[in-house]
Amino acid sequence: MSDSLLDLYREVILDHNRDPRNFGELDDADRVVEGVNPLCGDRMTLYVKKDKDGKIEDVCFTGSGCAISVASASLMTERIKGLTNDEALELFELVHDVLTGEQEPDPVRLDKLAALAGVRQYPSRIKCASLGWHALKTALTTTDAKISTE
Ligand code: FES
């Protein structure tokens, strides 16, 4: 992995952990999903509200996970507002493949999310980075209220 991608990783994780975007509850959410990382017991709750056309109108999260889980969820919420279900799920698959090393990060498609590829240097933290994303997939594809990254 290039030094510049690792620098971006550190910079973005620090920024989004220090100042998480869209952090808080959403009173009028259509879907509320709690995610848990069984490796550490950390929990995160994701709130999703759709507009009349089925696009993600608003999304927020709460929780007290590690810096990587908070930063990754923060980046996710920043990116998925305005997306359709299919677009958000496509992004989930792309991020999933990048986190697990199945795909190299494409800076054009991923933009700031490319920084998440840095987590591959720390395999035990991949579940941290994917916690919010798995909650998103659950919110968009099921009626479940809980997920585990196990
Ligand atoms: Fe618990 Fe990262 S250590 S989510």
Image (spheres, rainbow, N blue to C red):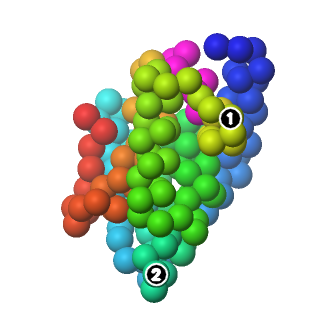
Which part of the image, by quadrant, shows the N terminus? top right
> Residue 132: which disc?
none
Observer-nearest of 70 and 1:
1
Is 74 located above or below residue 131 in the figure? below
At x 73%, y 42%, the residue is: 15
Residue 65 within the segment the image draws in magenta: no
Q: Tell me residue 128's x, y (percent).
A: 45, 35
Numbered circles on residues, count = 2
At x 49%, y 25%, the residue is: 103
Please report the bounds of the magenta region as a residue range.
Answer: 116-122
Task: Give the image quarter of residue 14.
Answer: top right
Residue 119 within the segment the image draws in magenta: yes
Task: Give the image quarter of residue 32.
Answer: bottom left
* Real-space CA distance between mark 2 and mark 1, rounded to the nearest whole angstrom: 29 Å
Mark 2 belongs to which amino acid?
A: Asp
30 sits left or right of 111 in the view: left
Counting residues from the start of the chain, the first of labels 2 and 1 encountered is 2
Q: Tell me residue 48's x, y (percent).
A: 44, 69
The crowding category of the residue bearing disc 1, from other C-alpha atoms within 10 Å (few below 14, some 14 to 19, many at least 20), is: few
Dominant secondary structure of the residues highlighted in magenta in the image? helix
Mark 1 belongs to which amino acid?
A: Pro
Q: Which residue is mark 2?
A: 53
At x 41%, y 63%, the residue is: 85
Q: Which residue is mark 1?
A: 107
Q: Is residue 142 visible in this depiction of the protein?
A: yes
